[in-house]
Amino acid sequence: MTTKNIVIFDGVCNLCHGAVRFIIDRDPSANFSFCSQQSETGQRLLKQHGRLDDSLDTVILIQGKRCFTESDAVLEIAKKLTAGWPLLHHFRILPKPIRNTMYRLVAKYRYRFFGKREYCLYPTETLKSRFLD
């Protein structure tokens, strides 16, 4: 399967699961495919992009040879969603250190506020083609 936009997410994080469902619901053109960081495919992609050390602390968006993390990944994803979500991309005018500080704060406490799963997300039959692992 060849895809242009791969979202690599923490497969045991409830917030991340919610984010994947959010993206799917607002991506009727199926611009995005998904892969959990804990899967073999996820680990291979992370290694290819030199992201193994910090992978669980950030969502990662791979677009071809480009790799986006933290707030850059979120804003790039928003740019391709339906309705008003692409307007969030304008937050790129905020300095990256400010955006990423806010991102890291949420990431640091995501398990505490949203909880963890014992297993990774298992897609329904209709969504299986969107998942790489």
Image (spheres, rainbow, N blue to C red):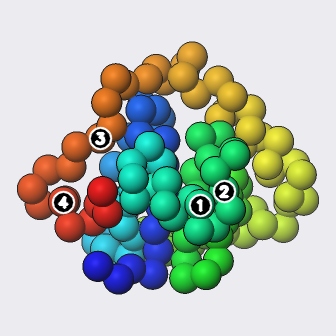
Q: CA distance from mark 1 to mark 2?
A: 6 Å
| Foreground pick, 116 / 74 | 116
Relative to residue 109, is residue 26 drawn left or right? left
Which residue is the site of mark 4?
A: 128
Quadrant (top left/top right/bottom left/bottom right) for the C terminus: bottom left
Q: Nearer the viewer, mark 1 or mark 3?
A: 1
Q: Which amino acid, by three-letter code, is at mark 4?
A: Lys
Residue 47 disc label? 1
Residue pictured at 57% horizontal, 16% vertical: 112
Q: Secondary structure at mark 1?
A: helix
Which residue is the site of mark 2?
A: 51
Asked whether disc 1 touches disc 2, contact meaning CB atoms under 8 Å apart, the reply is: yes
Q: Position of residue 65 (x, y in %)?
A: 61, 81
Q: Quadrant of residue 89?
A: bottom right
Which residue is the site of mark 3?
A: 121
Q: Nearer the viewer, mark 1 or mark 2?
A: 1
